[in-house]
Image: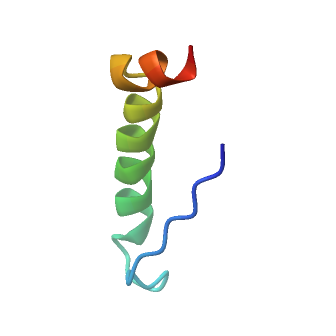
Amino acid sequence: MTFIINTSELSSNPQSKQLGAEMEVVNVGFLQSDEIAEIHC
């Protein structure tokens, strides 16, 4: 499974790393959710 995520956030923004970390947490949570487990089985 491949996800490509595009944002309009610039890497020069000091908050971009924090945003990336938050997005990662959300995506990992989604991939580990019951919703995806049902599809994967």
Q: Residue at x 56, y 22 (%)?
A: 40
User: At x 40% / y 70%, what residue is drawn?
Assistant: 16
Question: Viewed as shown, does residue 20 lie left or right of 40?
Answer: left
Tell me: residue 1, above or below residue 10. Answer: above
Q: Closest to the observer: 14 or 11?
A: 11
State the residue in front, 36 or 15: 36
Q: Locate residue 32 relative to residue 4 in the image: left or right.
A: left
Image coords of residue 30 (percent x, y) = 38, 33
Q: Quadrant of residue 33?
A: top left
Give the image location of residue 10, x and y in percent.
43, 85
21 or 41: nearer the viewer: 41
With 28 as the anchor, is 1 left or right in this view? right
Residue 34's spot in the image, x, y percent? 36, 16
User: Which quadrant holds the C terminus?
Assistant: top right
Q: Is residue 10 above or below residue 16?
A: below
Residue found at x 38% / y 80% = 9
The structure residue drawn at horizontal position 41% and vertical position 76%, both measured from the top left corner, is: 7
Residue 11 image point, x, y percent: 49, 81
- Image quadrant assignment for residue 26: top left
Q: How many marks?
A: 0
Closer to us: 38 or 3 = 38
Give the position of the N terminus as an image quadrant.
top right
- Residue 21 in the image: above or below residue 16: above
